[in-house]
């Protein structure tokens, strides 16, 4: 049986590929390694991420997406081609229909760039779905009902907030803050406080292993390695969860304020529904310790984290692709 439809969560940090009846078959970093000599692609995904911060002068490891949108068109096209070919397993008798999830706040120009890159990468038809809609579908929220549902999708590049009713977005906004901004904030904090320079991967490890949105009574600690800014020599230090919480304050505040802004614009009837049901968190960054508690404390709205939160958008693109007629009002289509 030939695969004819593919759903792609084209994330700033990770790209996930969903194939109907098979589920999510690819979950790899959105990283591409390029030769600076002849501009050829050397590696994509996991292999390319291993090269981040370790490449010689003739190899450049890049993330072609920034803040949820395409920053480097040709590299994104090459990355999409790699993921589509991998999903098809080399059987290219048919060009597939591809659905790509994009941020809700994307401009028409940015949307057109995604469509063009997807077609150029080998798709017969490209469909675009907004990430909050895809996340809600993937989180098993009945978006078609005449009731208000709020989804907050916090990914690597953006945090998307939307109130959905009758299959459409009533109020939505996005802020270009996510896991990558968290990593950068941790890097800056450790440089200022400890005079230690660390790489992206170390900052991500710190966030995952000891990060918390609220200060913890029982602090978590982690030993990290980096380069001493004063001496230029390698040095080890121990950081704790309070360092991460302190570093993330301004980024978390931006997310909270954006959520409050969406709630303030929500019609009263839908606000009542959201108070009853609570808001649902999805996206990989929603797995940060206590982020649900922080949002609840600052908004007084119940907060729930979706099952397999980091997979919701990819699963939602796949489900909507399998049921195009049911979700056609929520999708931008182009042939």
Image: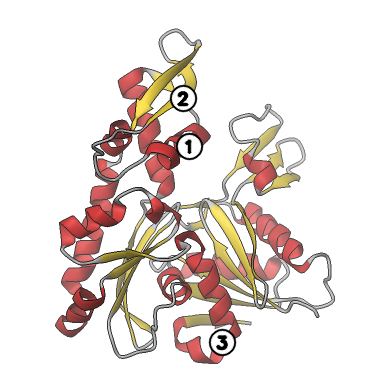
- Tell me where residue 207 sits by quadrant: top left
Vertical side of 139 occupied by 185: above or below: above
Q: Nearer the viewer, mark 3 or mark 2?
A: 2
Dot 2 crowding, Cα within 10 Å, few <14, some 14–19, many 20+:
some
Residue lying furthest top? 231
Nearer the observer, disc 1 or disc 3?
Answer: 1
Where's residue 208, x and y in %? 44, 42
- Tag 3: Cα neighbours inside 10 Å, few (<14), some, or many (≥20)? few
Apparent side of residue 319 relative to residue 172 in the rendered image (left or right): right
Structural crowding at the residue carrying mark 1, measured as other residues with C-alpha within 10 Å and reported as few (<14), some (14–19) or many (≥20): some
Instruction: Find residue 86 and report its horizontal and vertical position in percent.
Output: 75, 61
| Mark closest to the chain's N terminus, 1 or 2 | 1
Contact? badges 1 and 3 (CB < 8 Å): no
Q: Horizontal and vertical percent for residue 235? A: 47, 14
Rendered position, 130 above or below 147: above
- Report the disc number at residue 205: 1
The residue positioned 71% from the left and 61% from the top of the image is: 81
* C-alpha gap between disc 3 and disc 2: 47 Å
The residue nearer to you, when weighing 217 against 64, is 217
As drawn, 288 above or below 174:
above
Q: Label 2 near label 1: C-beta < 8 Å?
A: yes
> According to the image, label 2 marks what residue?
224
Could you tell which of marks 1 and 3 lies nearer the N-terminus? 1
Cα separation, mark 1 vs mark 3, equals 38 Å
* Residue 135: percent from left, percent from top: 44, 70
Going from N to C along the chain, the mark reached first, 3 or 2, is 2
Q: Which residue is denoted by mark 3 in the rendering?
A: 323
**SS at circle 1:** helix
Q: Are marks 3 and 2 in contact (CB under 8 Å)?
A: no
């Amino acid at each position: 049986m030939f695969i004819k439809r593919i759903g792609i969560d084209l994330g700033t940090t990770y790209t996930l590929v969903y194939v109907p009846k098979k589920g999510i078959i690819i979950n790899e970093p959105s990283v591409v390694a390029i030769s600076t000599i002849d501009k050829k692609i050397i590696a994509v995904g996991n292999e390319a991420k291993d090269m981040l911060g370790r490449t010689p002068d003739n190899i450049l490891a890049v993330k072609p997406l920034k803040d949820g949108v395409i920053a480097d068109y040709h590299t994104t096209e090459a990355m999409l081609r790699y993921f589509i070919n991998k999903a098809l397993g080399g059987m290219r008798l048919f060009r597939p229909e591809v659905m790509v999830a994009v941020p809700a706040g994307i401009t028409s120009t940015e949307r057109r760039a995604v469509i063009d890159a997807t077609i150029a990468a080998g798709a017969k038809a490209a469909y675009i779905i907004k990430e909050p809609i895809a996340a809600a579908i993937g989180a098993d929220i009945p978006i078609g009902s005449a009731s208000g549902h709020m989804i907050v999708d916090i990914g690597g590049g953006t945090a998307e907030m939307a109130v959905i009713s009758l299959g459409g977005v009533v109020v939505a906004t996005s802020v270009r803050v996510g896991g990558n901004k968290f990593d950068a904030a941790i890097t800056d904090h450790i440089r200022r406080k400890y005079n230690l320079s660390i790489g992206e991967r170390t900052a991500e490890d710190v966030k995952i292993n000891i990060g918390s949105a609220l200060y913890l009574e029982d602090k978590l600690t982690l030993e990290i390695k980096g380069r001493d800014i004063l001496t230029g020599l390698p040095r080890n230090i121990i950081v704790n969860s309070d360092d991460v919480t302190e570093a993330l304050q301004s980024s978390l505040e931006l997310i909270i304020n954006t959520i409050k802004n969406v709630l303030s614009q929500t019609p009263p009837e839908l606000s009542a529904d959201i108070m009853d049901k609570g808001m649902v968190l999805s996206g990989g960054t929603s797995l940060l310790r206590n982020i649900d508690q922080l949002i609840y404390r600052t908004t007084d709205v119940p907060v729930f984290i979706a099952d397999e939160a980091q997979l919701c958008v990819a699963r939602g693109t796949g489900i909507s692709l399998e049921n195009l007629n049911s979700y056609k009002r929520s999708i931008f289509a182009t042939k």
